[in-house]
Image: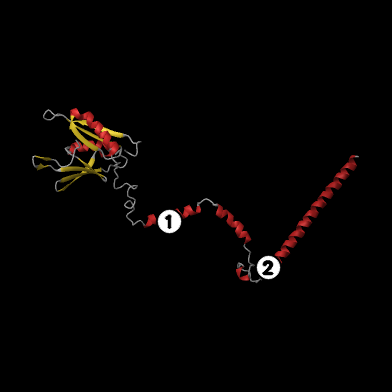
């Protein structure tokens, strides 16, 4: 079963959550924000400590991930 | 199929603690640097989910993540805030230098041959360069006459030098002859 997309359980429409990173958008599905953060950190090491902006448009919630600006000379 | 098979595909399986006697699994997969696809299911379905994730990764089009600061993706936005005037100047300077650094082509090599066949027009007085402090005005004919005189004197000097050398040779010969006489 592919996660994501709007789910209607018993007439109640759940909100669709999306992750946005760069120019790409990913359907979070049943994942929580914490789980999504862990998943993104595994695929994008630069997002180990991300900056997240939340945007809500109707039923959709988009979490925009951005790399936190680190100090000069730091590893990140 | 994925057009770049060199990139490794990263598949991750996350097993969450059981809730209501159901253990959930999240499988994510993507080639490196691409947005992952996410599959969720029960722990018992984990093998099928892995296969499905890999198959979908290979089937889908590449979804490389391009960030705003990435120059290669959006070169127009990567220009400086100053309006890109300086950048344009730099580009033109680069092209000029490239033009001078170009390799010599066959067409350019053949140009001097054509240039030799072009008849040279005689130099007029107006074309002669002005020399500071020189009040005399010499016409082109006079200049040509002076040039002939100079070449003639040069020839005379060359001959005199040759004669001097001959004279030196004769002196040496005489000395050698004298030495031979004394030796005898």
Tell me if residue A20 comes above or below residue B100 in the rendering. above
Marker disc for residue A9? none
The residue pinned by badge 1 equals B92
CB contact under 8 Å: marks 2 and 1: no
State left or right for residue B100 relative to residue B176.
Answer: left
How many residues crowd around disc 2 within 10 Å: few (fewer than 14), some, or many (20 or more)?
A: few
Q: Are marks 2 and 1 on the same chain?
A: yes
Residue in front for this viewpoint, B47 or B178: B47
Of the 4 image quadrants, the one containing the N terminus of chain B is: top left
Secondary-structure class at tag 1: helix
Q: Quadrant of residue A64?
A: top left
Residue B162 shown left or right of residue B90 in the figure: right
Question: Looking at the image, is mark 2 or mark 1 nearer the viewer?
Answer: 1
Residue B103, position in %: x, y? Answer: 52, 50
Q: Quadrant of residue B14?
A: top left
User: Could you tell me which chain the residue with mark 1 belongs to?
Assistant: B
- Outermost left residue: A10
Q: In front here: B100 or A49?
A: B100
**Residue B28 spot, x, y in % from top left:** 24, 35
Report the residue at 37% width, 57% height from top. B85
Choose between A44 and B143: the one closer to the eye: A44
* Residue B46 figure quarter: top left
Residue name at image x 25 percent, y 31 percent: B51
- Callout 2: SS: helix
Crowdedness of circle 1 by 10 Å Cα count: few (<14), some, many (20+)? few
Q: Which residue is mark 2?
A: B143
Q: Report the label total.
A: 2
């Amino acid at each position: 079963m592919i996660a994501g997309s709007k789910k209607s359980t018993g007439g109640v429409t759940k909100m669709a959550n999306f992750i946005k990173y760069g120019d790409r958008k990913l359907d979070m599905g049943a994942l929580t924000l914490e789980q999504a953060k862990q998943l993104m950190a595994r695929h994008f090491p630069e997002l180990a400590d991300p900056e997240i902006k939340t945007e809500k448009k109707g039923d959709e919630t988009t979490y925009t991930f951005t790399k936190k600006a680190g100090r000069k000379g730091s590893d990140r | 199929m994925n057009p770049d098979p060199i990139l490794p595909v990263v598949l991750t399986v996350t097993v969450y603690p059981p809730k209501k006697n159901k253990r959930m699994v999240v499988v994510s997969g993507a080639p490196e640097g691409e947005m992952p696809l996410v599959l969720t299911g029960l722990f018992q379905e984990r093998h099928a989910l892995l296969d499905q994730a890999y198959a979908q990764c290979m089937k889908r089009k590449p979804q490389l993540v391009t960030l705003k600061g990435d120059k290669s993706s959006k070169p127009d936005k990567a220009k400086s805030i100053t309006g890109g005037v300086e950048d344009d100047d730099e580009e033109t300077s680069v092209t000029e230098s490239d033009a001078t650094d170009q390799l010599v082509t066959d067409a350019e090599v053949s140009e001097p041959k054509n240039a030799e066949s072009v008849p040279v027009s005689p130099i007029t007085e107006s074309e002669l360069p002005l020399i500071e402090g020189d009040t005399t005005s010499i016409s082109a004919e006079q200049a040509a006459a002076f040039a002939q005189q100079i070449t003639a004197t040069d020839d005379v000097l060359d001959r005199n030098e040759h004669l001097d050398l001959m004279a030196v040779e004769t002196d040496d010969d005489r000395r050698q002859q004298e030495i031979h006489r004394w030796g005898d």
